[in-house]
Image (cartoon, rainbow, N blue to C red):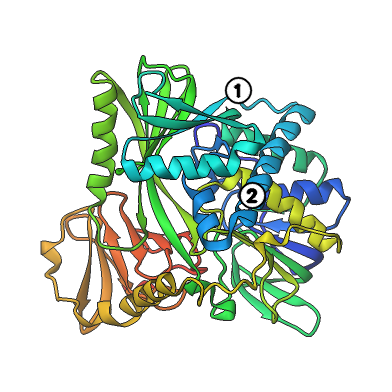
Amino acid sequence: MKDYIDKLLPNITEDTKTPVLIIGGGLTGLMCAYFMMKKNMNFILVDARLLATGVSANTTAQLSIAHDRIYDDIRKKHGRKKAISYLNAQIEGLEIIKKIIKDENIKCDFKEESTILGANEAKNLKLLKRQFDLIKDKKISKLIYQGKDFLKFKKGIEFTNQARFNPMKYMMSIIDILIKNKVPLYENSRVTKINKGNNDYEVIINDKYKIKTNKIIMACHYPFLNPDNLYFAKIYQSSSYAIAFKTKLKLTANYIFLDKPYYYLRTYDNKTLIIGGNDHYTGIDIDIKKCYEDLTNKIYELDKNAKIVSKWFTEDCMVIDSLPFVDKYSRRHSNIILVTGFQKWGFSNAHQAALNVVNILLGKKYNNLFKTNRWILFKEFKNSMRMIAHSINGLVLSKMFIKKHQLNDIKIGSGSVSRYKNTNVLIFRESEDKFIILKNFCTHMGCSLIWNDVDKVWESKCHGSIFDRYGKVIYGPALKDLERLN
């Protein structure tokens, strides 16, 4: 958020119409708007908050096709041919970004450098070999040994001609281009309901205004029309953590380490590096403090004189069969195009996906690798059952064993799930005598929530919705804030 510039864009203040509505003003929505603008298409883009301030704002944005173990995962689940197709899509996405930066003369601290996947554990050394066998024909990578820079590992794959840049400067430039071309962009305009007509949709904004549209591009992180197409059983949200730190250490490449604890390391500027990792399923009862501590310990292992600048978390949509969704939402909602599930690799995926969206709208050939009608639940039966178990826990089991807490037992600046006046509630203690009491009922599908005392947020136990201490939505799929009871 350091390089964010408020563009003072309007919000929706009246009923209106548009042929196409883009929901979501993160990178994916912005790139859909950019390519649609290039085709002189008519549309409106709305975002619940300010543009480029959601998940995209928290990315560390390695411009790389070195997507940790994903090529091997796709090979196992879908076969070699589709793994290569995914690789080709990432190569295309990376080249699109480079071309846009050059053609639009975008100043975003762009610098080409390698990305290296490294490992020491025997199982991950074998994984590296399998992945290299998949991608070696593309002449984009090479095997290296015994580490590089100040980092040590037994074996690595070096992906050449990758890059690093400043993602916020890039998105701010894209927004400026859209504004210059008079693209209708609206902020603080949250979609609170979608009503399906015979041949169109009525989209409700902020529970008040209506947008009539024929087609919708859902580029808002997580699909929220449930239970249609059972996305809640196919996608889970993964939280991850990042720390920026000042150091005299210099990197000549970006790094991703496959061994546990998984982490990555990249350059931010001449004096600052970013380390991230420690991913886990959002909404589980885990020691969040340790997630940050593990990364902090790694920093001081590398440089005992390092100075930590900032810490943050984000979450990503993970599809259980390892491929994104870029296609029609469902049979019932064939005029909604869903764009989600980029795992942790949003930048290369978002650009290639945005081109796919335009081709779908224009009735042209598009990459159907990311089709939404894949047979996932039976092919990924074990993962599907795990997802269903999480939902049952969040919807039923976790609500049955909530204890009553005394208000004075809750620390100031902390929260607790409790029984209060015979009601299942969330309590945040703001000061000595001020308590914020919320209904323990996620506005997405009614799941229970837990308190994250490190990041000071409420997390849904089912599908990854995150709310601030006062119950306001931070990350979806929830569309509405939690109900306040006092």
Q: Does residue 123 appear to the left or right of 432 in the view shown?
A: right
Q: Position of residue 300 (x, y in %)?
A: 25, 26
The amino acid marked with disc number 1 is Lys
Give the secondary structure at mark 2.
helix
Question: Which residue position holds label 2?
Answer: 84
| Residue 211 falls in image quadrant | bottom right
Q: Residue at x 62, y 25 (%)?
A: 110
Pick the front one: 250 or 190: 250
Q: Position of residue 274 (x, y in %)?
A: 41, 31
Question: Which residue position holds label 1?
Answer: 111
Give the secondary structure at mark 1.
strand
Dots 2 and 1: beta carbons under 8 Å?
Answer: no
Q: Residue at x 19, y 77 (%)?
A: 402
Say whether residue 67 is visible.
no
First of labels 2, 1 by sequence position: 2
Q: Is residue 445 above or below residue 155?
A: below
Pick the front one: 219 or 407: 219
Q: Residue at x 54, y 49 (%)?
A: 71
Given the current orientation, which residue lies at the most extreme top position?
248
Foreground disc of the pair 2, 1: 2
Q: Position of residue 234 (x, y in %)?
A: 50, 70
The amino acid marked with disc number 2 is Ile
Which circle marks residue 179 in the picture?
none
Q: Residue at x 23, y 47 (%)?
A: 289
Q: CA distance from mark 2 to mark 1?
A: 26 Å
Q: Does residue 372 appear to the left or right of 451 in the view shown?
A: right
Q: Position of residue 342 (x, y in %)?
A: 56, 53
